[in-house]
Image (cartoon, grey):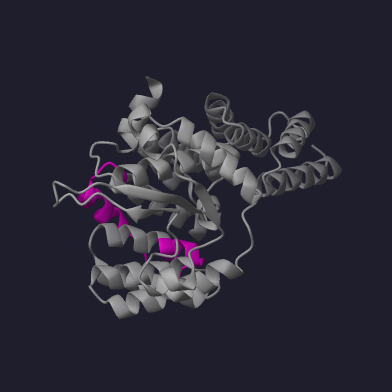
Amino acid sequence: MGDEAQTELEKVLESGWQALDRGAAGEAARLAKQAVALDASSAEAQTLTGGVASAEGDLDAALAAFQKAMSLDPEYFEPALLAAQLTAASGDLETGLTLAEQALDRAEEEEEYLDALLFKAELELAIEDGDAAAETLADLPPLDVKLPEADFHIRAAACFFELDDLDSAEAHFRSAAELAPELGDAQHGLALLAQARGDEKEMISRFEKVRALDLAAPPSPFAVPEMRLVERAEAARNELPAELRDLIAKAPIRVEPYPSEEMVKEGLDPRTVGLFTGEPLDPEDKKSQAHLEHILLFQKNLERDARSADELDEELKLTLLHETAHFFGIEGFDEEGFDELDED
């Protein structure tokens, strides 16, 4: 490929990934096809094709494209990590772990190495192999060394927190806060650490900082109008198992942008996604009866981690599921149980 054609391909690829980041899947798909037309043997073009397929929910096509990219360039890191992430997200954690190890072997840059190493540890924790995760995390640089991005510190801190290594978690959260003081994730982690240590005053102080930072952050690319979110929440309620749906069928759904300052000062986690108001069932009182007044949803929190409209809808269903089961004291309705009921 000539220099001019290579330059054109690079521009198309960059534009394609930017479109995906904006949530413009249609534009990204067009650019991926253009990239393949320019050079079908390009591992980068196949990787973008996989990214588009993943965003569209076609996991088989995405994995096929990533595998093709890996075969076209055995040293290319990106498709190996994306394949690992996609495989793990589909529920196959063991295969995802194998692919994460392949990605780690392909890592050449420091950021690639850290990304794959942390993902490997995250998967080991997900399959409840804490010893393996601790061994993997031991390959991180010393705690006093700043990593290239705040996100690496936040991910490392989350892993250490899950391993109950609170001191290491705190060191990484503090490093993240120094590197990116405008992000709420580090302050939120420090608040959860304070909560774990029983320091309510510190927890609330950190929660207030999280609230201020989150409200100043730009909106999600998948943000929807308030009334549209109410409609989607109504649809999610209708998809709940009948046993739960009937309990909340008459409760009005209200949407607020974010938990109020008063709620946070009272100790509510500012990143709470949903809250039922009223009188919940008291499991200690056999005569207790639950009285649900409102279903309160916090839009910014629901939209924060959604990477697509489908993920937002799934988050709505899970929020309603968890809050209903908690409010009415119903046990056994975890995410796995919900999936099984949903299939029925």
In the picture, the quarter occupied by the N terminus is top right
Q: Is residue 18 visible?
A: yes
Residue at the image point whose x is 57% and y is 31% from the top = 57
Q: Quadrant of residue 244?
A: top left
Residue at the image point whose x is 25% and y is 56% from the top = 134
Q: In which quarter of the image is residue 93?
A: top left
In the picture, the quarter occupied by the C terminus is top left
Residue at the image point whose x is 65% and y is 39% from the top = 44
Q: State yes or no: residue 41 in magenta.
A: no
Where residue 127 sits in the image (x, y, percent)? Answer: 27, 41
Q: Can residue 76 be seen in this view?
A: no
Residue at the image point whose x is 44% and y is 44% from the top = 251
Residue 51 versus residue 125 in the image, above or below: above
Where residue 35 sits in the image (x, y, percent)? Answer: 75, 35
Q: Residue furthest top?
A: 344
Where residue 89 sits in the image (x, y, percent)? Answer: 44, 37
* Tally of marks: 0
Magenta residues, start to end: 126-154
Q: Quadrant of residue 187?
A: bottom left
Of residues 62 and 218, the one nearer the viewer is: 218
Of residues 155 and 208, the one nearer the viewer is: 208
Where residue 273 sits in the image (x, y, percent)? Answer: 45, 54
Q: State yes or no: residue 142 in magenta.
A: yes
